[in-house]
Every structure is written in structure tokens, then in C-alpha cells.
């Protein structure tokens, strides 16, 4: 059984080597639309006295775990429901440093966390570029981006790199010129951005349109 955060992240069952054991050729799937509304989607997998076989899984011969390819915010809504129903979850893109596998013993992930990746990436970038200070821009209304910010800030502090400014944005924002202008005025050597892919692309593009060619590291 599969559900995911958006169509672009939907897994290719054939190429991923995922085996769906079922009497019929159709496995239940649902698209949360990249929102935290997984609480409305997950119950279709958890219909039954044991909570292990959902209405959509009635044709499956062997109870199968849903593979959730979702962002962290979606997982924090869906995974407690799966845990309560004792339905195993194997997530492929939940990278928040805390709060995912802590949900329970039925919750698993195969992705590295931000806390495992960002410190070493920052160290490599600093060794290559030699920046002496940095600024941070992050989304303050999303579990993943807030968690990424926490790791970025802690990593900079641990490395003794001064943070000259911190700016925030909301997930639905599309214009980042105000934040980028404020950050540019502080003249940081390096910019760290904790954002989802859509916002990250716009931030980099708008920074360059402002004529700001500062090195940018995302998370």
C-alpha cells in the first residue's frame, strides 16, 4: 500500500523493486497534495478490528506496509495513525532530526536526517570557500524547515561561525525579496536556507536577480 505527499514524489513500484502481494493488480494509493492532511488519508489503510488491513487492502493476501514517500510535516500527521493501527511505515524522505521514529516502533525511515548531513556538508563547504560568517533563511511554519534551521544554527555555532542575521518566511510565500534584501544588507559570506524545493528554487532565483551571488547551501 502506498501513499505520498505529491505526484512528483510518487514511487515507481516497478523500478524500485517493490513487491506488492495482492489478489488483485491494484494496491490502494492516496495523494495528500503535499499538505499535513494525511490524517484524512491514512485511515483508508487502517480499517478493521486489528487496524492492520484497511478497506483498500481487503484484496491483499498478506498484510503489506504502506511505503510513505512524504515530507516530514505529512508524516507527523499520518504516522501516529499508522502506529496506533500497528501498521509498519517505511518512509523514504523524512529527514527531520527529531520526531519521526520517536512516534513508535512501527515507524521506520531509510533517509539520513538533517542532523547527520548538514554538519558535515557545512564543514566541507567552509573548507572549500573559507567563509567567516553566515546568515540563515528558513520557513517557520513547517516541521521539516524548522528542524533544518535548528540544525543549521547549531552547526554554525558549533563551528564558531558568527550568524549575522536570520530571516523567516511562510510555506505559501512566493516573494522573498524583502528577506533577501535584508540579508544582503548584512553582507554575509555564506547563506544557509532551510526550505522545501519550490521555495528553495524561488529563493535562489530571486537572490541572483537582486545581483547577490553569495554562496548558498540548502537543507
Image (cartoon, rainbow, N blue to C red):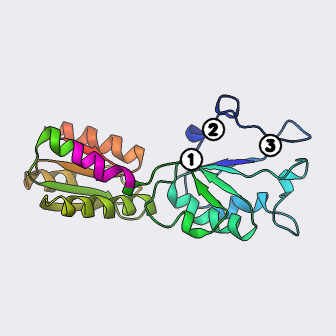
The one nearer the camera, 171 or 120, is 120
What mark, if any, has residue 92 been given in the picture? 1
Dot 1 falls on a residue whose secondary structure is loop
Residue 186 in sight from this viewpoint: yes
Query: Horizontal placement of 206 versus 33: left or right?
Result: left
Mark earlier in primary sequence (1, 2): 2
The one nearer the camera, 202 or 116, is 116
Mark earlier in primary sequence (2, 3): 2
**Residue 173 on image: x %, y %:** 36, 54
Query: Horizontal placement of 122 versus 38: left or right?
Result: left
Q: Are marks 1 and 2 in contact (CB under 8 Å)?
A: yes
Q: Residue at x 67, y 63 (%)?
A: 106
Vertical placement of residue 77 versus 110, above or below: below
The one nearer the camera, 109 or 212, is 109
Residue that label 2 marks: 11
Q: What is the distance, in whole Å, between disc 1 and disc 2 at their CAs?
A: 10 Å
Q: Is residue 122 magenta?
A: yes
Prevalent SS, magenta region: helix
Mark earlier in primary sequence (1, 3): 3
Number of callouts: 3
Query: Horizontal placement of 191 versus 39: left or right?
Result: left
Q: Residue at x 46, y 50 (%)?
A: 112
**Furthest-top residue in this view:** 15
Label 2: how many Cα within 10 Å (few below 14, some 14–19, many 20+): some
Residue that label 3 marks: 27
Dot 2 falls on a residue whose secondary structure is loop
**Residue 118 on image: x %, y %:** 32, 51
Residue 214 in sight from this viewpoint: no
Start-end of magenta stretch: 116-124
**Residue 32 on image: x %, y %:** 62, 53
Amino acid at each position: 500500500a502506498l501513499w505520498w505527499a505529491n505526484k512528483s514524489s510518487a514511487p515507481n513500484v516497478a523500478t524500485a523493486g517493490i513487491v506488492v502481494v495482492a489478489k488483485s493488480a491494484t494496491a490502494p494509493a492516496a495523494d495528500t497534495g503535499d499538505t499535513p492532511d494525511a490524517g484524512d488519508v491514512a485511515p483508508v489503510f487502517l480499517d478493521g478490528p486489528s487496524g492492520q488491513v484497511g478497506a483498500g487492502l481487503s484484496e491483499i493476501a498478506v498484510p503489506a506496509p504502506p511505503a510513505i514517500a512524504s515530507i516530514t510535516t505529512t508524516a507527523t500527521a499520518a504516522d501516529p495513525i499508522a502506529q496506533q493501527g500497528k501498521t509498519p511505515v517505511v518512509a523514504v524522505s523524512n529527514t527531520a532530526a527529531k520526531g519521526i521514529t520517536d512516534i513508535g516502533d512501527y515507524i521506520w525511515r531509510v533517509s539520513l536526517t538533517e542532523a547527520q548531513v548538514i554538519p558535515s556538508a557545512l564543514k566541507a563547504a567552509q573548507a572549500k570557500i573559507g567563509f567567516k560568517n553566515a546568515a540563515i533563511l528558513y520557513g517557520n511554519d513547517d516541521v521539516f524547515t524548522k528542524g533544518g534551521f535548528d540544525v543549521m544554527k547549531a552547526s554554525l555555532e558549533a563551528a564558531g561561525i558568527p550568524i549575522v542575521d536570520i530571516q523567516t518566511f511562510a510555506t505559501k510565500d512566493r516573494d522573498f525579496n524583502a528577506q533577501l534584501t535584508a540579508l544582503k544588507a548584512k553582507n554575509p559570506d555564506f547563506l544557509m536556507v532551510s526550505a522545501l524545493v519550490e521555495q528553495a528554487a524561488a529563493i535562489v532565483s530571486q537572490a541572483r536577480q537582486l545581483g547577490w551571488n553569495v554562496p548558498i547551501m540548502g537543507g
